[in-house]
Structures are given as structure tokens and as C-alpha cells.
Image (spheres, rainbow, N blue to C red):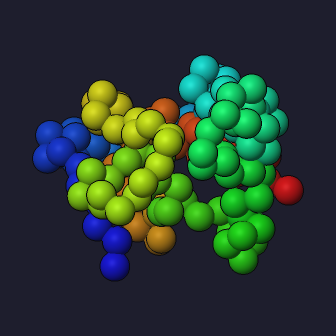
Amino acid sequence: MRAYSFSLTGVLGLAALVGCTEVSMPEPDEGALFFAENCVACHGPTGRGNGPIAKDLSNKPVDLTLLSKGNGGTFPTAKALAYIYGNPERADLSRSMPEFGGAMEDDLVPLEVDGVMTPTPRVLAALFAYLESIQR
């Protein structure tokens, strides 16, 4: 069983937002911008794990274009959310990738995660839209 934590304020804010207005979901190009600014150094411009500093890392970056292939053809949203957002309760996740949680909590959108609409930072929803668009 996976456990995720979100701030009560963020969850209530999302509930109010969804109940009162139409939420615009992010598009892949918004995620591509975040990717270019934060991920290319390790994962490379095409997401294949061949960024300019990848060779210097002890943990080689994952080929992000194969995430769906490694998950039976379905994009692994829950796993990606937990890994990218960061899970401070899981100290066993030794990694070199930074956690992107914290400041992202203020701008949430509903994202379907394992069949459940989940309050998710907009920038991560955008990143997932982009990553899904580059799967091969």
C-alpha cells in the first residue's frame, strides 16, 4: 500500500477549486519547460538518461522514455509521483535525484493516480503529461 501526504490546506483548496471553477489541466509543453529547466542535465534533452553530467553520477539516470514499457505499457503515475515529489518517510530511497516537493504544494490540480483523483502539484502533472508524450 502506498501512502502519500498532502497539506490539509492544499486538499481543501483543491476541493474548493474543483467545486467552484473549471480546472485547466497542464499540457505537455508546460511539462517540457520544467523538464528542460530541471532534468536535462542528468536525463538528457530526449529523456534517455544521457545528460551532460550523467557520466559523473554513481547512480545512472533512468531512461524516462521507457517508463511505460517497464510497467506493462501503462505510465506508472503513482510510482513517478512518489519518486519525483520525494518521500521523506522512505529513507531507503538512496538517490542522487533531488526531491521536488515543498514549494510545489500551493498550486494543485486533480490527477488520476491508480484510479483516484489526487491533489497533485500542477508542475508535476505537467511533467507527467510531457513524460507520457515521450514514451516509446
Q: Is residue 113 visible?
A: yes
- Quarter holding residue 16: top left
Residue projecting furthest to the left? 8
Identify the residue at horizontal 72%, vertical 70% (top origin).
70
Percent x, y of residue 87: 32, 53
Q: Residue at x 66, y 48 (%)?
A: 60
In percent of width and height, residue 15 lies at: 25, 47
The quadrant in which residue 107 appears is top left
Please state if 25 lies on the left or on the right of 86 as rendered: right
| Residue drawn at point x = 78 percent, y = 38 percent | 50
Above or below, 42 against 62 in this view is above
Seen from the viewer's position, the closer of residues 120 and 60 is 60
| Residue in the picture at 47% in, 71% down | 115
Residue 69 rendering spot, x and y as whole percentages = 77, 68
Q: Name the side, left or right, on which 62 lies relative to 19.
A: right
Q: Quadrant of the N terminus?
A: bottom left
Q: Is residue 6 left or right of residue 58?
A: left
43 and 74: which is toward the camera:
43
